[in-house]
Image (tube, rainbow, N blue to C red):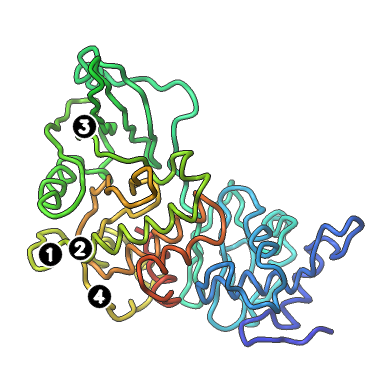
């Protein structure tokens, strides 16, 4: 029987319970690498937060571990733990302390799929955090709208004959439109339906006006609302989003610009003059005690800065030469530990470019990865 190579690896008891739920390793055609090795690699990465490319060689090729981790359908969860393998809600309990008959439940086979990770079923969402583990889901991706988009009446009125093009849809259904006039002038309109309190467009307008005294952010000349929704008009900035096809084809350059741009923002905006808060308490306001217990005690503050608040790749603009151009979507801008931005900015490179570029963000920013703070602020992002 294979022994345990690291204190965080699967124990023999845990492995015996998981083995019947997995396809044979080394099947004909060589599709599956050794499951135990790969699962241990996934758990090591979730536990430490290291870039995928920096996984120790004992776990085999890092790309194999990454692909197995990402193979499952949406609603996947990466599983970390302190001690033995943690349980994932009512779907699976595999820790040495919680092994029980649930491991034989029908949902488990579907949850495990044919991968080396635990995955919750879309029909049975996971709400199963505990102090003994960290579960981080990949956030639903915002994206360029793929099909026809109904243009809200307020946007039609604001366009006043300009060409209207939908350019972005966020996770909450909010839309961004580009308005182009006959002379080549460009504006953008963000619109969100009524009853979406998570998006505060008047608050974003205030933050843009404040941050614009020091940083490259859009001007916001107009905003308003009606019974259908709210809108915010912003002037165009030079540059292209870091998820423009130009930059998804050159992710290393884009990731470096994300890191450098974030460092510039953090170094430039004056913390003492910022009237906005993005701290942990504010972000957890209205959340129940269970959410706080899931997070546990926060790590000590590394460095207070004025955070972007949504430093994901799409919100960084690059000049055509690959240098940083500016930031957009600053509706959550406020004072917090810099890792609240850094952890998510680097994480977003995986969603938009694939594995291996999170380390580029940290290097360009000028900081070494901090596994404890990365794990905490990514879980906070999911919860808040």
Residue 230 is marked as 3
CA gap between label 3 and label 2 equals: 26 Å
Front residue of this view, candidates 167 and 126: 167
On the rendered image, what quadrant is the N terminus found in? bottom right
Which residue is the extreme one toward the front?
321
Q: Are marks 4 and 2 in contact (CB under 8 Å)?
A: no
Q: Residue at x 40, y 71 (%)?
A: 376
Q: Is 259 displayed left or right of 351 in the figure? A: left
Front residue of this view, candidates 326 and 89: 326
**Residue where numbered disc 2 is placed:** 306
CA gap between label 2 and label 1 equals: 7 Å
Label 4 CA crowd tier, 10 Å (few <14, some 14–19, many 20+): few
**Residue where numbered disc 4 is placed:** 303
Q: Position of residue 240 (x, y in %)?
A: 36, 40
Q: Earlier in the sequence, mark 3 or mark 2?
A: 3
Which residue is the extreme one toward the left?
273
Q: Earlier in the sequence, mark 1 or mark 4?
A: 1
Q: Residue at x 55, y 72 (%)?
A: 80
Q: Is 52 displayed left or right of 246 in the figure? A: right
Q: Are marks 1 and 4 in contact (CB under 8 Å)?
A: no
Numbered disc 2: secondary structure: strand
**Residue where numbered disc 1 is placed:** 270
Q: Position of residue 95 (x, y in %)?
A: 63, 77
Q: Earlier in the sequence, mark 3 or mark 1?
A: 3
Label 3 CA crowd tier, 10 Å (few <14, some 14–19, many 20+): many
CA gap between label 4 and label 3 equals: 35 Å
Camera-near label (3 vs 2) is: 2
Q: Are marks 2 and 1 in contact (CB under 8 Å)?
A: yes
């Amino acid at each position: 029987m294979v022994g345990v190579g690291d204190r965080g690896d699967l124990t023999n008891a845990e492995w015996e319970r998981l083995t019947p739920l997995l396809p044979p390793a080394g099947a004909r055609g060589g599709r599956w690498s050794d499951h135990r090795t790969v699962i241990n690699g996934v758990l090591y990465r979730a536990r430490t937060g290291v870039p995928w490319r920096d996984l120790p060689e004992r776990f085999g090729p890092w790309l194999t571990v990454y692909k197995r981790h990402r193979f499952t359908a949406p609603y996947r969860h990466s599983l970390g733990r302190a001690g033995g393998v943690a349980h994932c809600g009512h779907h699976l309990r595999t820790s040495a302390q919680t092994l029980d008959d649930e491991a034989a439940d029908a949902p488990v086979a579907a949850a495990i799929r044919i991968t080396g990770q635990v995955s919750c079923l879309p029909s049975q969402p996971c709400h199963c955090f505990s102090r003994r583990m960290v579960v981080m889901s990949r956030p639903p991706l915002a994206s360029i709208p793929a099909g026809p988009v109904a243009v809200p009446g307020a946007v039609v009125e604001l366009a006043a004959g300009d060409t209207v093009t939908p350019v972005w849809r966020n996770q909450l259904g909010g839309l961004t439109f580009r308005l182009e006039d006959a002379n080549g002038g460009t504006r953008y309109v963000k619109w969100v339906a009524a009853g979406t309190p998570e998006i505060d467009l008047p608050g974003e307008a205030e933050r843009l006006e404040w941050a614009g005294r020091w940083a490259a952010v859009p001007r916001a000349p107009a905003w308003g609302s009606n019974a259908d929704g709210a809108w915010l008009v912003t002037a165009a900035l030079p540059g292209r989003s870091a998820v423009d096809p130009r930059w998804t084809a050159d992710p290393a350059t884009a990731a470096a610009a994300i890191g450098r741009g974030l460092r510039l923002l953090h170094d430039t905006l004056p913390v003492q003059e910022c009237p906005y808060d993005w701290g942990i308490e504010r972000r957890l306001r209205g959340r129940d005690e269970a959410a706080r217990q899931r997070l546990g005690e926060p790590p000590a503050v590394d460095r207070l800065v004025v955070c972007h608040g949504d430093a994901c790749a799409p919100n960084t603009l690059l000049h055509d030469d690959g240098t940083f151009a500016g930031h957009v979507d600053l509706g959550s801008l406020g004072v917090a530990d810099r890792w609240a931005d850094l952890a998510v900015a680097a994480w977003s490179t995986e969603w938009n470019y694939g594995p291996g570029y999170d380390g580029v963000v940290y290097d360009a920013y000028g900081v070494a990865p901090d596994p404890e703070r990365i794990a905490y602020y990514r879980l906070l992002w999911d919860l808040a």
